[in-house]
Amino acid sequence: MVLLRDHAALRRAHVADAAGLGRYRAESDFFSPHLFCLGGATPAGHTFARHFGTPPDVSEDPVTGSATGGMAAYLWHYGYLKSPDFLAEQGHDMGRAGTVQVRVSGPPEAIDAVQIGGMGVVVLEGGLRADL
């Protein structure tokens, strides 16, 4: 979770060494970077985020629900949000705009839960088969 100062800084962000990030990810508990700033990509949003992947994953995820939940807890805990209910935006600069409805339950010093929701689109389906 990395809070950036503004949209310009967020838009400039990039992974300069994908292979190095992949090695770091493989050798540590680090998953992937979720960068965000206050203020939405649109007037309706309260936050705007980007989530970078590492090979063999996609290089950037248009909407990352699990990271949005962690971001919400961080922002609420450290007092960056005025309300525990807000709209998080991600993917706009990729042409795959997404909005996540977020609700944080509990006071900032003792968060009980974070709920996220929104519209989803199936991009891949699969199944498991057991050959005995």
Image (tube, rainbow, N blue to C red):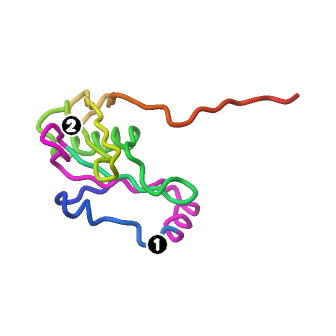
Identify which amino acid the numbered label 1 is placed on.
Answer: Asp
- SS at circle 1: loop
Residue located 85% across and 30% down the image: 131
Disc nearest the viewer among 1 and 2:
1
- On the image, numbered disc 2 is attached to which residue? 108
Q: Is residue 59 left or right of residue 106?
A: right
Closest to the observer, 97 or 82: 97
Percent x, y of residue 132: 88, 28
Closest to the observer, 2 or 58: 58
- On the image, numbered disc 1 is attached to which residue? 17
| Span of residues in magenta | 19-46
Residue located 15% across and 41% down the image: 81
Q: Residues within 10 Å of mark 2 (few under 14, many from 20)?
A: some
Q: Residues within 10 Å of mark 1 (few under 14, many from 20)?
A: few
Figure check: 34 above or below 122: below
Closest to the observer, 39 or 91: 91
Identify which amino acid the numbered label 2 is placed on.
Answer: Pro
Percent x, y of residue 113: 33, 29
Percent x, y of residue 57: 53, 53
